Image (tube, grey):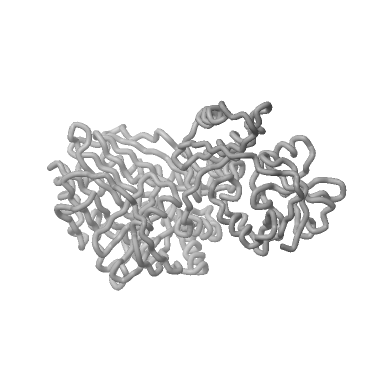
Amino acid sequence: MSDAERVLIAREPAEVSLVLDRAEQAVADGNWVAGFVAYEAAPGLDPALSVASTLDTMFDSMPLAWFGVFPERTPAGSSGDDEYDLGRWEAAIDEEEHHRSIDRIQSLIRHGHTYQVNYTFGSTTSFSGSARSLYRDLVAAQTCGYGALIETGRWRIASASPELFFEWRNGRFVCRPMKGTAARGLTTQSDEKQRLGLLASTKDQAENVMIVDMVRNDLGRIAVTGSVETPALFSAEKYDTVWQLTSTVTANSRPGTSLLDAFRALFPSASITGAPKVATMQIIQELENRPRGVYCGAIGFGGPGADEKPEWAFNVAIRTVVVDEDQGIAHYGTGGGITIDSTAEGEYREALLKAEVLARRTADFRLLETIRWEPEAGFRLLDRHLNRLMESAWYFDIPIDRSDPEELLAAATAELNSGSVVRLLVDRIGNATVEVAELPDSGALVLLAIDDRPIDRLEPLLYHKTTSRGVYEMAAARHPNAHDVVLWNEAGEVTETTISNLAVLIAGEWWTPPVSSGCLPGTYRAELLDQGRLIERVVSLDDLRRAESIARLNSVRGWEAAELTEA
């Protein structure tokens, strides 16, 4: 939506209700509206709710509520290709202050003042350039179902929120509170272990169900009696850096319910306050002692739906960057729900984990499988290649059916009459393509240089074959006189080469580094392990240098003898 015909703004708590009423009237008149309600708008909806003062903070001149009114909705277009620059993020508190606050919260829980507190803190940095490009990178770094970019003039808000505050359509409310977090695994197998661990976590379940009960209670204030339901409890949702535990609560709205009624009953979302809401927001005000701004508020839109009936949808404004163009400052909030079972160290790690989205400028990549094909034998290790492809597609949430690449591969080789390399590529939205090339020469001794800097084994792309090859290309460029380069991690463990897995002969056994050291789970490597020709062992740089023999392994070239060089 662009070129608002008018703007509705609340700068004082008493104006919030009026803005929501006018937004609803604008939709009733056939318009679309889009905007935000800041966390500090809460007292304008319920005077019992406590928030920190915005005076003398970066938010002191930011509206409490802002909605643009648009006669029509238009396609969003490009999210931005211009550059931007972020400085170093500085947290408003240090780890020691965070731990003191957690101790205080748990003392209040033990004394019965609260059951759960969503404790947060903000970080700020300098910002210049395109907020649209910042939004593009936020969304690319973390798949989000409820993202939004709002540009009001002075303020730019880029939200990559995964959480639905409420959707209101055809008289039915849907809320999807999110509470409970686990880090993503690096491989498909470790990722599944993390998912199952989150689903089985009694701590995360307790946090989640407490918020679900609050949402049910809040919805009950505006719902038809008996209509509040929880159709999905404890669903694990996958995002680029974290697994989130999500539940779904639904209800039928009472006749005559207004948008203002919905906000008075539900705002702020229970997932970013805690339980009970009134008492817990007072604790938040005292402990955080800083405004949250749009963070933990709501961003959304409304417009004519089916049969011209109004429809509304708002996110919970988490994973959200607010940019003050006048001051050149960006703000980002993070935090989590604190219960009696929480540990200060664990909660601090979780808060930092949720902020990783800020550091990830995810390259646009495609999944890649490079497969050898010969007229008599067909594809080498095809099942292993397709299995690996499908596992990576699951990991990155790429929608593709196994039959699609199978059909493409068959078509690409139907008229080939000589050995070839077939490259199968799948982009982030599931489009598959095939490229065919000649087989490379093989058989000559491979000269390997050892790279002079370690790889970061916490980089997920190391464990999946993709077109994102920056790490490998830079290593190769540092050693132009070698045929290939051996990579190693920060612990001094050998991982692989820039194009192949590696094996070393030590004491009569062929060792290959484990995937956990930071290498690709190669298909030929897997075949040799299953045949008993290799064993997985951590290989140190010293092991590599003292090895009786070295081999380079990949499914196209096969087994190639190698030796070290000083190149």
The spot of residue 515 in percent (x, y) is 67, 47
Residue sitting at x 53%, y 38%: 435
Q: Is residue 81 visible?
A: yes
Query: How many numbered circles are shown?
Result: 0
143 on left or right of 291: right
Q: Compare residues 320 and 297 and report the one nearer the observer.
A: 320
Q: Quadrant of the C terminus?
A: bottom right
Residue sitting at x 24%, y 62%: 153
Residue lying furthest bottom? 56
Residue sitting at x 43%, y 58%: 334
Q: Compare residues 318 and 335 and report the one nearer the observer.
A: 318
The spot of residue 154 in percent (x, y) is 26, 65
Q: Compare residues 188 and 264 and report the one nearer the observer.
A: 188
Q: Is residue 196 visible?
A: no
Q: Is residue 428 above or below residue 17?
A: above
428 on left or right of 494: left
Q: Is residue 50 above or below residue 405?
A: below
The spot of residue 388 in percent (x, y) is 60, 38
Q: Quadrant of residue 59?
A: bottom left
